[in-house]
Image (cartoon, rainbow, N blue to C red):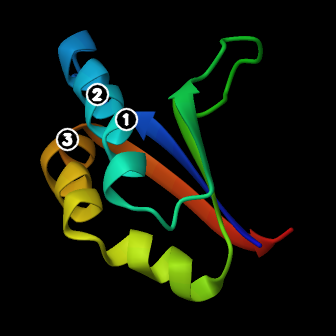
Amino acid sequence: MIRHVVLFTWTDAATDEQKEAVVTELRKLPAAIPQLRAYAFGPDAGINQGNHDFAVVADFDSVDDYLVYRDHPLHQAVIAEHIKPIVAARAAVQFSV
């Protein structure tokens, strides 16, 4: 199994409406991309200072399944239309579990 983890820090100008739009659009992906085996995302709980603002964790059966998700037009649209306009920093990793 491949696990994909992404962390975002939003810009200071990012509005609550923009952040909620990210959540709304990400919720649509599991129904559109059957290769997703598990999918969780949400804002940082605010327990530790210095954390990123938002995380996405996705599990796939194989690298090929991850690549389908990565390149899927709906996923790419969420990134282009909702995430990139408000992202200040991004960190990501994919690893085997």
Residue at screen point 26% across, 37% down? 25
Q: Which mark is residue 27?
A: 1
Judging depth in this view, the residue of 13 and 44 nearest the camera is: 44
Give the answer, above or below, for where 41 lies relative to 73: above
> SS at mark 3?
helix
Residue at screen point 26% across, 12% down? 16
Give the answer, above or below, for where 29 lies relative to 11: below
> SS at mark 1?
helix
The residue positioned farthest toward the bottom in the image shown: 64
Is 63 situated left or right of 12 in this image? right
Give the answer, above or below, for where 70 lies relative to 33: below
Amino acid under label 3?
His
Which picture quadrant has residue 61?
bottom right
Q: Which mark sits nearer the N-terminus, 2 or 3?
A: 2
- Say if mark 2 contacts mark 1, CB within 8 Å: yes
- Say if mark 2 contacts mark 3, CB within 8 Å: no
Q: Which mark sits nearer the N-terminus, 3 or 1?
A: 1
Residue at screen point 13% across, 48% down? 81
Q: Residue under circle 2? A: 24
Amino acid under label 1?
Arg
